[in-house]
Image (spheres, rainbow, N blue to C red):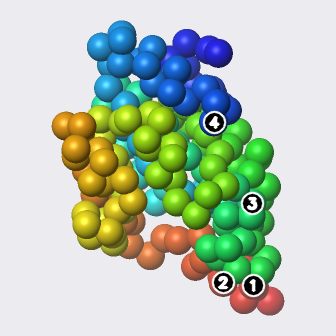
Amino acid sequence: MSAPGQTGLILERSQLAAWAAEVHAAGRTIAFTNGCFDLVHRGHLTSLQTAAAAADTLVVAVNSDDSVRALKGRGRPLVGQQDRALLIAALRPVSAVTIFAEPTPLECILQLRPDVLVKGSEYREEDIVGAREVLSWGGRILRVPMVEGLSTSQIIRAIRNLP
């Protein structure tokens, strides 16, 4: 296991709790967010930068390929889970990445016990998976404004409409 806060770190699910314990024992805070990150765009980067600024470390849970298919439908993801995880892990704001296959990232949240849970502003706080749990241990919820006009689905539609 690499040192907490190292860019490019990809954690197995079995490593999450121990890694988080090291971070917290060092007096550092953890922000957590999740997503498909199928085609990474400026909206993703803006969200990750905002999330990273909310704590000392940022952990991103990337949906597995099967999870993306269940959420987005046939033909998705365009980029496989290992490549998506590597790409997100290489971004400067990101401390660590893990991949999850469950319908929600709740198990990751429970293992990490983040200080800040970050989601897009399109979600109401009461609808954010893990919000109740994070608030119960003294954490907070951060809803990040979306970048208008940017989504992976919009990019895919634009590509499909090319002559």
Q: Earlier in the sequence, mark 1 or mark 4?
A: 4
Residue 69, how many percent across, how many down?
Answer: 72, 71
**Neighbours of disc 2 within 10 Å: few (<14), some (14-19), many (20+):** few
Q: Earlier in the sequence, mark 4 or mark 2?
A: 4
Residue 53 lies, with reference to residue 141, above or below; the image says: above
SS at mark 2 in the image: helix
Query: Marks 4/2: CA distance?
Result: 34 Å
> Is label 1 or label 3 in front?
3
Could you classify mark 1 by the number of other residues whose Cα lies within 10 Å: few (under 14), some (14-19), or many (20 or more)? few
User: In which quadrant of the rendered view does residue 109 lie?
Assistant: top left
Relative to 10, is 38 above or below?
Answer: below
Find residue 87 and report its horizontal and vertical position in percent.
67, 42
Residue at mark 1: 160
72 horizontally vs 104: left or right: right
Could you say where residue 96 lies in the image, as x and y percent from the top left?
55, 31
Q: Position of residue 32 (x, y in %)?
A: 42, 42
Circle number at residue 13 = 4
In this picture, residue 108 sits left or right of residue 127: right
Mark 3 crowdedness (10 Å alpha carbons): few <14, some 14-19, many ≥20: many
Identify the amino acid type marked 2. Answer: Arg
Give the labeled residue for mark 3. Answer: 65
User: Which sits earlier in the primary sequence, circle 3 or circle 4?
Assistant: 4
Q: Can you say whether 28 is above or below 26 in the image?
A: below
Alpha-carbon distance for marks 1 and 3?
21 Å
